Image: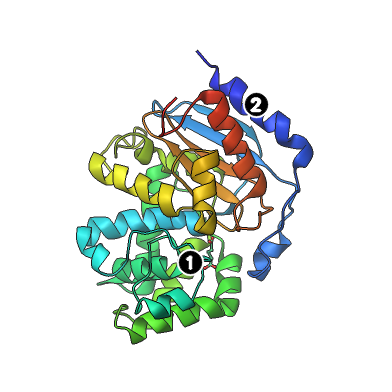
Amino acid sequence: MTDLQDVVDSVYHDLADRIGEGKLADYIPELATIDPKQFGIALVTTDGTVHAAGDAETSFSIQSISKVFTLTLALGKIGDGLWKRVGREPSGNAFNSIVQLEQEKGKPRNPFINAGAIAVADVVLAGHLPKEAIGEIVQFIRHLADDESIAIDHNVARSETQTGYRNVALANFMRAFGNLNHPVEHVLGVYFHHCAIAMSCRQLAHAGLYLASAGRNPLSGGSVVSSSRARRINALMLMCGHYDGSGDFAYRVGLPGKSGVGGGILAIAPGKASIAVWSPGLNENGNSLLGSAALELLAQRTGWSVFGQ
Ligand code: GLU
């Protein structure tokens, strides 16, 4: 049997010389101030055992990884009704493409590109004030991670609120097509704040565990979603979780994953483990360069893949 701590240590060790490679996401000014020389891995098995290496306890901006959790909440609220407003296809486009949204009449391709996540934020906002919806999302993630210390980095939220012009454009397009029910500022307030949630690799791997455990969170003990919903969220992560690099990630890693421009990636080995990696430098598709390399090595060394041994 493979010793998972040895695998995690060997992956960290083999990539340690490359720490600092890649480009920071500087379009959100606050993210450009991060020290690029950081790299963490945390793997939590379905029985709750943690294997970690490097900066696994350092908090970072989870950015688009938060979209997995808001999708889960939105599906809990309106179920399959969500798919009238958001598609389930890979976008084949940049995460913030406006052209596609215009062509497809305000219905985003999937819940993980920015437009799709903004529509999901609109669903989570229904019946709430923005700060209540933000509170519900933070509380949900704290519950999943079994950790009350998880919080929003308000400097990141402010930075994006001041500079998120493309997201303002996407939201206005959707509102014009009738695909947002709340004022654009309210929906974006929810979206920018959930993207600005800060978590460590260990917290994130804990929070993702329900997707590796047929919808149950072994830490909090309860059922989060049905097993079929967990499978479907995993399917969406596999097809759409890495922007326009999703095909390459599926080919190289073979596991459902969701990346964020803060340099984090959450990957799920169904029935086995939830894995979070983080290194701020990004590759040309906006995915963590070292994080993707780490997951590729980890998948090779464990033999984990949704496509077979
Ligand atoms: N908050 C970021 C944005 O809207 C999320 C991007 C990402 O992580 O993909 O640009």
Crowding near the residue tagged with mark 1, few <14, some 14–19, many ≥20 C-alpha atoms within 10 Å: many
Residue to which mark 1 is pinned: 193
- Tell which tag, 1 or 2, sits nearer the viewer: 2
Q: Is residue 183 above or below residue 218?
A: below
Q: Position of residue 21 (x, y in %)?
A: 75, 49
Q: Quadrant of residue 137?
A: bottom left
Return the residue nearer the eye: 219 or 70.
70
Residue 298: tell me if it is visible. Answer: yes
Asked if the beta carbon under badge 2 is closer than 8 A to the nearest atom of ligand 1, the reply is no
Residue 263 placement, left or right of 203: right
Q: Is residue 78 above or below residue 119?
A: above
Q: Quadrant of residue 11?
A: top right
SS at mark 1?
A: helix
Number of numbered discs present?
2
Q: Position of residue 111 (x, y in %)?
A: 38, 61
Residue to which mark 2 is pinned: 9
Return the residue nearer the eye: 88 or 217.
88
Q: Are marks 1 and 2 in contact (CB under 8 Å)?
A: no
Residue 180 placement, left or right of 55: left
Q: Position of residue 253 (x, y in %)?
A: 53, 38
Crowding near the residue tagged with mark 2, few <14, some 14–19, many ≥20 C-alpha atoms within 10 Å: some
SS at mark 2?
A: helix
